[in-house]
Amino acid sequence: MPRYFLHSGNFSNELLGPGRDPLKLDPFFQPSIAYFSCSDPITDDPRYVAVEGRGCEHREHVYAVVRDSLYGFGVKDIKVGCQLKVATFATARDHKKFNQAVSYGEIYKMLSQGFELSWLYVICEDRCGKGRDCSVVDESTDEVRCDPQNCQYLYEQPNTVTYKCSSGGGTAENIISAISLFCIGLYRGFMQNFGLNKATGYDDENIAEIGKSVGRYILPYFIIRFLFGVIAFVVLLMYKWGIRHKSKYENIEAFLQENTLMPIRYSYKEIKHMSRGFKEKLGQGGFGLVYKGKLRSGSFVAIKMLSKSNFNGQDFINEVGTIGTIHHINVVRLIGFCVESSNRALVYEFMPNGSLDKYIFSKQDSVSLTQRQIYEISIGVAREIAYLHEGCDMQILHFDIKPHNILLDENFIPKVSDFGLARLYPIDKSIITLTDARGTLGYMAPELFYHNMGRVSHKSDVYSFGMLLMEMANKKRNFNPHADDSIELFFPFWIYNELSGENEIEGEIVSKQEYNNEVKKMFLVALWCIQSKPSDRPPMNKVVEMLEGELENIEMPPKPFLYQVNDHNIKSYQTLSNDSSESTSYPTG
């Protein structure tokens, strides 16, 4: 054994690198063995191996501990009452981890073989240059590989080495190494923001330090900015989608209006926007209020806001389900509806000339219609009712035909409206069953009150049309509550006497000979329509033929007579129109 250590640092720091010492331990694979003297036996740590062959006179307990550089044996592993006596290097054993339990015989063998010193660093200086590191490729040929990073070890003071690496190695290797160091520093710096990584490895590397700073300060900024960008993009995308969706709804609305398909469902907000906050009121009735509105396409509409107190859900369903499926020139078109919370609204095409009642019951100085216009309107209404009865897939009975429900467009073309009391039945079903009377007093057929008059059918609408036609021809209501006798009380009595006696109709009804036949035709057809027995009334297609045909082809109908409707009859039926007449006497034929 040499008297002095062969290494200037006494092998105390095997990581100093190659210096002026020609020999160096292999720091990674070189194990060490330490001897400890303990006052008490050690039984809870298999790493402490009892030293064999000692005399009984020794009271202390001596143990040998094998340590390798991978797993280590630090101060914290020294047991209480134990002192380090001596430590030395030993020869490594193949294929065995040195922190596992071994016998003292194996430890003795390791010590007897000594430990290895390497002359590799001298060879590295000879083959690769001063201060360069290298590794053995083939021991049989002494082939070595120089460090690709071209790192040199510079001595600034005794036992102190500074690593200086140049770019003399391969460019690709340098780039990969730099990127690796940067990424490691980036990751560690970023994780330090969350207190998850406190390691300080690579702190002496400039590239790693740069990556660490970027990861800790700059990377979070870009991540936050990216997240805000994603959120802004999603919001913008949703906004664009909403605009596109709204535009699509406008196109759908225009398509449905142009092709007269099913009505559109609007929200209450859209209804309020159409009417400009319900600014312009067109009319009012027991059902609610009617306002003027405007669609996004520019078309004007009439918006009927149904009264909450008088709202009938079934009537609303009838209106939407019936008129929404009818497409005829003489039926007012239902464009849309609203059902939202307690708000109910119906959106119709706008009729600028209002309802028929204000023309036929007008006072002096009011706008009036010519007899020719009234005659044309009567034919239009008759055609529409005939279409409802026979022109649809289902037979539609209106049950509330009256002047108030006949609307006029800008060309005075009549449009039947208000299908709240309507019912749908198969075409081949001539007689129907109702649980309640429905309609407006003064226009309701007698069979709706008296079952012995006949069964309810499409002939009930014929009766209502007859009463309407009588008022259109006379331009007055059929009942005169101030009359002295029944003939003057009920206009159909008076006109029947005039027609049956072949007397000329006087007053304001006829002003020119060319209108005389049209007026007579309207009266005769009306008298046929108000016959008391449903079987005596003509169907609506026959009514249209009579109105369009010659006066001479219409026979004189039987004389009508009054029937009384007492309070009991009225109270027994509750499905009556909100603007019902107060009259209690009705004609039968």
Image (cartoon, rainbow, N blue to C red):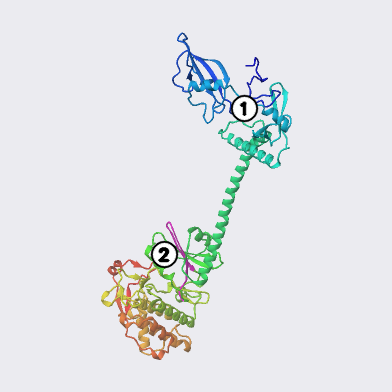
Q: Of label 1 and label 2, which has the lower sequence position?
A: 1
Q: Nearer the viewer, residue 536 or 259?
A: 259
Disc 1 from disc 2: Cα separation: 103 Å
The vertical placement of 542 against 51, above or below, is: below
**Quadrant hosting residue 419:** bottom left
Q: Amino acid at mark 1?
A: Asp
The vertical placement of 57 against 194, above or below, is: above
Q: Quadrant of the N terminus?
A: top right
Q: Is residue 334 magenta?
A: yes
User: Percent x, y for residue 539?
Assistant: 36, 81
Q: Nearer the viewer, residue 531 or 486?
A: 531
Q: Nearer the viewer, residue 6 or 219?
A: 6
The vertical placement of 210 against 422, above or below, is: above
User: Percent x, y for residue 402?
Assistant: 40, 74
The reply, left or right, for residue 161 in relation to residue 333 is right
On residue 139, which mark appears?
none
Of the two numbered discs 1 and 2 in the rendering, the one whose residue sits closer to the viewer: 1
Q: Residue at x 56, y 33 (%)?
A: 195
Q: Is residue 512 magenta?
A: no
Q: Can you name the residue that lies furthest to the top here?
A: 57
Q: Amino acid at mark 2?
A: Phe
Dot 1 corresponds to which residue?
Answer: 26
Q: Residues within 10 Å of mark 2 (few under 14, many from 20)?
A: some
Q: Can you name the residue that lies furthest to the front here?
A: 140
- Secondary structure mostly taken by the magenta-highlighted segment of the chain: strand
Dot 2 corresponds to which residue?
Answer: 287
Report the span colored magenta: 330-348
The vertical placement of 265 against 428, above or below, is: above
Q: Residue at x 47, y 86 (%)?
A: 515
User: Percent x, y for residue 122?
Assistant: 70, 27
